[in-house]
Amino acid sequence: MLTKHATIDEYLAGLPADRAAALERLRRIVLETAPGAEECFSYGMPAFRFEKRVLMAFAARSGHLALYPMSGGIVTAFAAELAGFDTSKGTIRFQPGHPLPDELVRRIVEARMDEIRR
């Protein structure tokens, strides 16, 4: 689903309710954890810019939802806590019925912000 959308709201509106709700929850957590982050699109995906760099992105794919921390180091650093999820170097995949825990998302956002600040 890498189509062009004018806004993240428009992107989410085109998804089934359960998938949109799961991604909206991620969106809310990122914006609460990273004050001043700006919504944008990166590689055709809804994303967040922090201090002029892409903080992270998310997307709905055909068989899963995904969070992209835009850093392989983040996925590696949280590998133990992400053991119940499908991951690759820069992707964390999950299902609407088995979302990432809110506190884990907050810590991932904070870790990514720290990377950007360094």
Image (cartoon, rainbow, N blue to C red):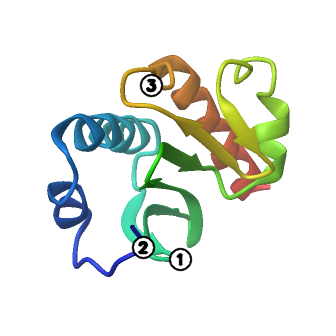
Q: Distance between the residues labelled 1 and 2?
A: 8 Å
| 70 or 112, nearer to the observer | 70
Q: Which amino acid does label 2 sit on?
A: Leu
Residue ID for mark 2 = 2
| 26 or 36, nearer to the observer | 26
Q: Earlier in the sequence, mark 1 or mark 2?
A: 2
Residue ID for mark 3 = 99
Observer able to see residue 109: no
Q: Vertically, is 81 above or below 27?
A: above
Q: Quadrant of residue 97?
A: top left
Secondary element at image label 2: loop
Q: Vertically, is 43 above or below 8?
A: below
Secondary element at image label 3: loop
Residue ID for mark 1 = 43
Secondary element at image label 1: loop
Label 3 packing within 10 angstroms: few (<14), some (14-19), many (20+):
some
Q: What residue type is labelled 1?
A: Tyr
The answer to whether the residue labelled 1 contacts the one labelled 2, judged by CB atoms less than 8 Å apart, is: yes
Q: Vertically, is 71 above or below 8?
A: above
Measured as percent of width and height from the top left, residue 118 is found at 80, 55
39 displayed left or right of 108: left
Q: Which residue is drawn at 25% across and 64% down?
A: 11
| 110 or 2, nearer to the observer | 2
38 displayed left or right of 53: left
57 displayed left or right of 35: right
